[in-house]
Amino acid sequence: MANRKVIYEACFEDYLRTAGVPYVAVDEAKKALFAGVRLKSFDFVVYSASGANLLVDVKGRRFPYERAGSRPSTLRHAQGRPEPFDHAHGPEPVEGHGRGATDSGRSRARPRGRRRLENWTTREDLESLAQWEEVFGSGFAGLLAFCYHLTRPEAAEAFEVVHLFRGEYYALVGVYRGAYADAARPRSRAWNTVSVPTRTFRELVRPIRAFF
């Protein structure tokens, strides 16, 4: 496994390994292959048996989402301390299954419930991923893989794919870049971010294993 500093990317890679999905991690050594291309890098090339091969950009978020100062979570971060925001991706921009080691084993195709699914990303991420699709050519598609750190035990019931990693549970869903970009709305001008309304996002995302 690549030496990944970001807990969400490490979790996603562990899921791929557990599920036996072929992939290549885009670590610093491999990024040298694209030294002449000035684009923000993605995280994994995943080879799919059911469709286009995937250029995966992992997005780490929490569920249920609680702003700083809200009631503390009943679960702890992997390092044993509360997680005030998504450390791997900076502070959240303000707007202007039975559970096994890999899957919950339940049949729900999409996350359910009324809690907000944080799904913001930057315009740069979307634009770079679109250009990477052109670099790789036909047969490859950009995928946003959202890895939700479940901050409460009951949150796992809302997802089909839940992965246990380093003593914590993470839900994994995905959406093709193109579908996300078409539905995205401006979120923060200061951070140059966009997001998809939760209701629409729930309709777009699929359990991550559906893409392999």
Image (cartoon, grey):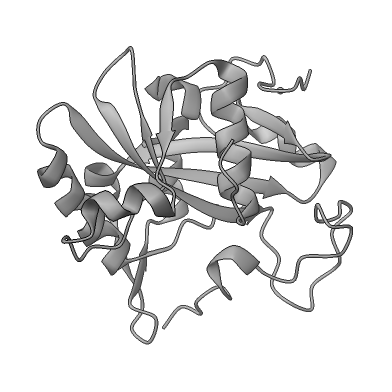
Please tell me which residue is depicted at 56% across the width and 54% down the height of the picture: 60
Of residues 49 and 110, the one nearer the viewer is: 49
Tally of marks: 0
In the image, residue 110 above or below residue 146: above
Rendered location of residue 89, percent (x, y):
54, 66
The answer to whether residue 86 is visible is no
Please tell me which residue is depicted at 51% across the width and 30% down the height of the picture: 110
Rendered location of residue 108, percent (x, y):
57, 21
Rendered location of residue 134, percent (x, y):
10, 45
The answer to whether residue 39 is visible is yes
In the image, residue 63 above or below residue 121: above
Which quadrant: the C terminus? Answer: top left
Of residues 190 and 131, the one nearer the viewer is: 131
Please tell me which residue is depicted at 38% across the width and 24% down the height of the picture: 211
Of residues 22 and 65, the one nearer the viewer is: 22
In the image, residue 193 above or below residue 196: below
Name the residue furthest bottom: 190
Which quadrant: the N terminus? Answer: top right
Q: Quadrant of residue 186?
A: bottom left
Q: Quadrant of residue 106?
A: top right
Q: Using residue 95 as the reference point, say whether residue 151 is left or right of it.
A: right
Rendered location of residue 185, percent (x, y):
30, 65
Of residues 125 and 204, the one nearer the viewer is: 125
Please tell me which residue is depicted at 51% across the width and 80% down the height of the picture: 94
In the image, residue 53 above or below residue 198: above
Q: Using residue 135 as the reference point, say whether residue 72 is left or right of it.
A: right
Q: Quadrant of residue 24?
A: top left
